[in-house]
């Protein structure tokens, strides 16, 4: 193995490692690989940026621009939003998504077509309570099948057309792939409309912390002023709740300031508004320490009276 071959393998290995690492963007990794090849002499300086003038790069970039323009216009979402309410069965929904992705992949870039339909697939899966994999995997195959119908559907078609032009002097036209690609795409989409049943149905996304702990109905946050000027009608339920024999919360690290209270369960009781009758001596000491200075004599008097 020569020195240039070893350096080439080292640069490619470094680039793939950075891709797997995922901390840097793909374009930054590609630019770093190009600079590394320039530094070790694998690529001549005059040919470093020659690839940007290639027709394939321009065609692929233009297709991505068109895909982004169609995605931001919202035409596909508006068209499918009128049809989706009438399509309720899973098979009809998958058929609609599969054929829509296949048709758009033949016109624009297949990656852009798939990206435009992903929000609609997630919305249908969430409303129907189904696993998103039932919709996403058939859509991924449909984007590949639709891309082989036209020249701009996928990048390999463009590369093959460029090689044919270099060999024969005449590239492939826009719909030269259609006689073969259209039949394959149609057969593949029909299979996907029924073959989705082979996918596992028990795949569910990870539950959120609130769903895992099931605490959405038990945690309440209440805001009260630090020193109210006078009792208001809205503060009477709070005083009445303090006098009730309800379980109180023990103080914990990171307790909110006196202007914010973290309440537990329907009864309003917090780390500095605990009921002296039901709390332990340690809880009463913590509650008195967290109270304003002016309110501590009153709290002590209530504690002595309760004894």
Image (cartoon, grey):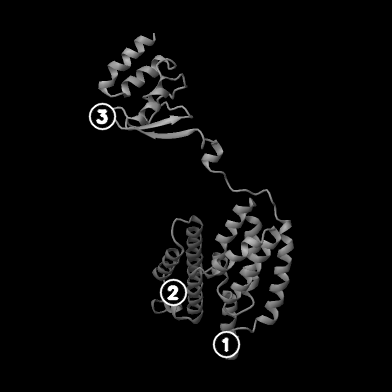
Mark 1 / mark 3, whichever is N-terminal: 1
Q: Do the residues bearing badges 2 and 1 touch, measured as CB atoms within 8 Å?
A: no
Mark 2 / mark 3, whichever is N-terminal: 2
Q: Position of residue 181 (x, y in %)?
A: 68, 77
Q: Position of residue 235 (x, y in %)?
A: 36, 29
Q: Helix or strand or loop: what does disc 1 sit on?
A: helix
Q: Position of residue 168 (x, y in %)?
A: 60, 90
Compared across the picture, whether 174 is left or right of 287 comes to right
How packed mark 2 is, by other alpha carbons closer than 10 Å (few <14, some 14-19, many 20 or more), is: some
Task: Establish if 139 lies above or below 64.
Answer: above
Which numbered marker is on residue 165? Answer: 1
Q: Number of callouts in the render?
A: 3
Q: Helix or strand or loop: what does disc 3 sit on?
A: loop
- Residue that carries the numbered disc 3 in the rendered image: 229
Eye-nearest disc, 2 or 1: 1
Mark 2 / mark 1, whichever is N-terminal: 2
Instruction: Determine the image quadrant of residue 143.
Output: bottom right
- Residue that carries the numbered disc 2 in the rendered image: 43
Camera-nearest residue between 220 and 182: 220
Q: Which residue is at 73% across, 68% downward?
A: 190
How packed mark 3 is, by other alpha carbons closer than 10 Å (few <14, some 14-19, many 20 or more), is: few
């Amino acid at each position: 193995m020569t020195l240039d071959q070893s350096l080439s393998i080292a640069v490619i290995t470094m680039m793939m490692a950075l891709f797997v690492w995922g901390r840097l963007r793909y374009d930054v990794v590609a630019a770093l690989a190009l600079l590394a090849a320039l530094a070790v002499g694998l690529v001549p300086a005059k040919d470093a940026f020659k690839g940007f003038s290639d027709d394939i790069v321009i065609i692929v970039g233009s297709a991505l621009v068109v895909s982004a323009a169609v995605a931001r216009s919202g035409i596909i979402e508006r068209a499918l939003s009128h049809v989706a309410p009438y399509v309720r069965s899973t098979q009809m929904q998958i058929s609609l998504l599969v054929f829509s992705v296949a048709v758009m992949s033949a016109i624009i870039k297949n990656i852009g077509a798939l990206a435009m339909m992903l929000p609609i697939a997630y919305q249908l899966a969430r409303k129907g309570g189904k696993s998103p994999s039932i919709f996403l995997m058939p859509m991924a195959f449909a984007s590949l099948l639709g891309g082989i119908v036209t020249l701009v559907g996928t990048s390999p078609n463009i590369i093959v057309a460029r090689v044919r032009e270099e060999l024969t002097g005449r590239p492939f036209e826009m719909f030269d792939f259609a006689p073969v690609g259209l039949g394959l795409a149609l057969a593949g989409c029909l299979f996907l409309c029924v073959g989705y049943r082979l996918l596992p149905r028990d795949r569910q996304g990870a539950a959120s912390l609130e769903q895992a702990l099931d605490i959405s109905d038990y945690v309440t946050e209440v805001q009260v002023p630090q020193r109210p000027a006078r009792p208001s009608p809205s503060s009477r339920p709070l005083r009445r709740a303090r006098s009730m024999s309800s379980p109180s919360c023990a103080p914990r690290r990171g307790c909110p300031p006196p202007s914010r209270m973290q309440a537990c369960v329907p009864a309003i009781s917090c780390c500095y508004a605990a009921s002296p009758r039901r709390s332990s001596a340690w809880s009463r000491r913590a509650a008195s320490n967290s109270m304003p200075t002016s309110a501590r004599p009153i709290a002590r008097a209530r504690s002595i009276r309760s004894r």
